[in-house]
Image: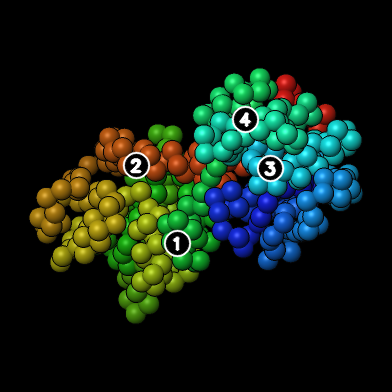
Amino acid sequence: MKIAIVHYTYAPVIGGVEIVIAEHARLFAEHGHEVTVICDRGASSDPRIRVRLLPDAHDTAELARALEEWLANQDVVFMHNVTTMPFHLALTAALWRVAERLTGVRFVAWVHDIAACNPDYDAAERTEAPWPLLSRAHPRYGYVAVSDLRRRQWEKLTGAQCRVISNGLDPSRLLGLTEPVAALARQHHLLEREIVLLHPTRLLRRKNVELGLRVTAALTAAGRSCAYVVTGAPDTHNEVSRDYASELLALRAELGLEGSALFLHEETPVDERDLASLFALADALFFPSRQEGFGLPVLEAALHRLPIFCAAIEPLDALLAHGVTHFDLDAQPAHIALKIAARLGTLDSWQARNQVRHQYAWPAVYRNFLAPLLAENQAAASPQCL
């Protein structure tokens, strides 16, 4: 589809709405749509996204002529705040006029803020044109609010129907993931999993990685979307370690976990910054060693506020007094999996994290809301049909 996005400014201008628009433009472009951003100030560093700058004028007729030329061949036009805020009233009026003329184009007004509902503005008292347009619903606009509050305010003000599509965020950026770890997360959809278990270890038999594989299989069989991330490589100087690595790969294949159990030496070496990113990415530490001299990853996980699941052996059982769930090494993998799921289910922080990833991460916003919006019949351009 050909998609136009209209706002006052665009990146590199910094602002909340600008960030949302930039993410929308990126998502639309990534999914094969042709994207044009129309604004007063801004530029694109992405060759897939075109930026058109509005004429340096506050004449409604001049703006309308430019907009009509640019928008005539678009499938859908998303207008962010410019229909409800008074920062460029000539643009507001020009879009109103153009939407009446371009009946084959779908116009969608994105409601982030409403001047008429905000006492900081006097929009409700201003009667001279084009101020009243900020308090009216255009018969050809569909309306999308960023929250249920904004939806209720707009519907009460205008009587127009309005749907809600929330803003989103980029977990990789906010978590500070290094590019190798961010790429790994994208490739294996780690941020969309319900449970990501991290096991920082080299591939040595005493590290008991096979138990991690079997617990992951048990969680998967129980309907959990799970990934098991093992950081280390086999010891190249140790033939026994290489043999153990081969056994683990065979067990992974036997359990059908090729896409869920990741041995990172197959993907990329892990440096210190990458390891910190993996702690930020993971939902829990899984540490099933049969023998340990100390167990530093347990302390590292605690500093990263991760729930910790580790074997009930010395010295692991004496490192921390809080935040650790121990399991017996002779316990069945299904029992350990149940213990992990039950413990995580009691943690508000884990539940909130999952809600953010599955409801507010940009891939989820696109999949659940933006893609269906685009897929609707283009003729559904009225608030009643939107």
Mark identifier at residue 139:
none
Residue 128 percent location from the top left of the image: 73, 34
Marks 2/1: CA–CA distance: 19 Å
Mark identifier at residue 125:
4
- Which of label 4 and label 2 is nearer to you? 4
The kind of residue on which mark 3 rests is Val
Q: Which element carries disc 1, helix, strand or loop?
A: loop
Residue 117 percent location from the top left of the image: 56, 31
Residue 35 percent location from the top left of the image: 75, 52
The first of marks 3 and 4 along the sequence is 3
Position of the C terminus by quadrant: top right
**Callout 3–callout 2 Cβ contact below 8 Å:** no
The kind of residue on which mark 4 rests is Glu
The kind of residue on which mark 1 rests is Leu
The first of marks 4 and 2 along the sequence is 4
For residue 207, side relative to residue 61 (left or right): left
Q: Which element carries disc 2, helix, strand or loop?
A: helix
Marks 3/2: CA–CA distance: 38 Å
**Mark 2 Cα shell of 10 Å, populated few (<14), some (14-19), many (≥20):** some
Q: Which residue is mark 3?
A: 82
Q: Which residue is mark 1?
A: 177
Q: Which residue is at a point 84% across and 37% down the rendered structure image?
A: 97
- Which of label 3 and label 1 is nearer to you? 3
The front one of 314 and 372 is 372
Q: Which residue is at a point 29% across and 38% down the rendered structure image?
A: 347
The first of marks 3 and 2 along the sequence is 3
Q: Which residue is mark 2?
A: 350
The first of marks 4 and 1 along the sequence is 4
